[in-house]
Amino acid sequence: MADKKVASLAEVKEILLERQEEQELTAEQKLALEHCQKFSRLEHKTVKKLLKELGELGFLTEANTVKIADVMPTHPDDVRVIFAKERANLEKKDVEKILSIVEKYL
């Protein structure tokens, strides 16, 4: 189980759609696909670009970049909520950098 990977909603949606073509999805997979279709705001290719750009900031973990891509925050408070459980406190300039990157993809 050491090979865990964080996946964005767009990536999960793409995986489930591929599986759906191959075989019948389980009830849980169908619910997950429905959730992804409702709440995924970007296409998988666009999310990849966004994750790469957020990762280049240097102070975000992979899990944080995926959360940001899934939520697509538009306000500084939205970003702070994502980091509420983190020990590190984001500076105002870091929050602004995140928001400016996200804004490009909205």
Image (cartoon, rainbow, N blue to C red):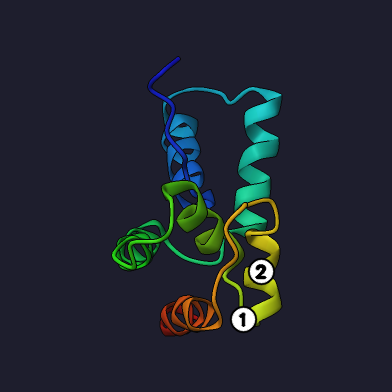
Mark 1 secondary-structure assignment: loop
Give me the residue at 43% from left, 38% from top: 15
Q: Is residue 97 above or below residue 66?
A: below
Query: Residue 80 at x, y = what percent?
Result: 66, 69
Query: Residue 35 at x, y = what percent?
Result: 68, 48
Give me the residue at 42% from left, 48% from top: 62
Q: Is residue 95 above or below residue 12?
A: below
Number of disc labels: 2
Label 2 near label 1: C-beta < 8 Å? no
Mark 2 secondary-structure assignment: helix
Q: Nearer the viewer, mark 1 or mark 2?
A: 2
Q: Is residue 15 above or below residue 83?
A: above
The quarter of the rendered structure image containing the N terminus is top left
Give me the residue at 57% from left, 58% from top: 88
* Residue at mark 1: 74
Query: Residue 90 at x, y = what percent?
Result: 56, 69
* Residue at mark 2: 80
For marks 1 and 2 on the same chain, the one whose residue lies earlier in the sequence: 1
Q: Using residue 12 as the reference point, say whether residue 54 is left or right of it.
A: left
Dot 2 amino acid type: Arg
Out of 7 and 13, give the one closest to the viewer.
Answer: 7
Dot 1 amino acid type: Thr
Out of 7 and 92, give the one closest to the viewer.
Answer: 92
Query: Residue 72 at x, y = what percent?
Result: 57, 70
Circle 1 crowding by C-alpha within 10 Å: few under 14, some 14–19, many from 20:
some
Q: Marks 1 and 2, how far apart in space? A: 11 Å
Q: Using residue 29 as the reference point, say whether residue 63 is left or right of it.
A: left
Circle 2 crowding by C-alpha within 10 Å: few under 14, some 14–19, many from 20:
some
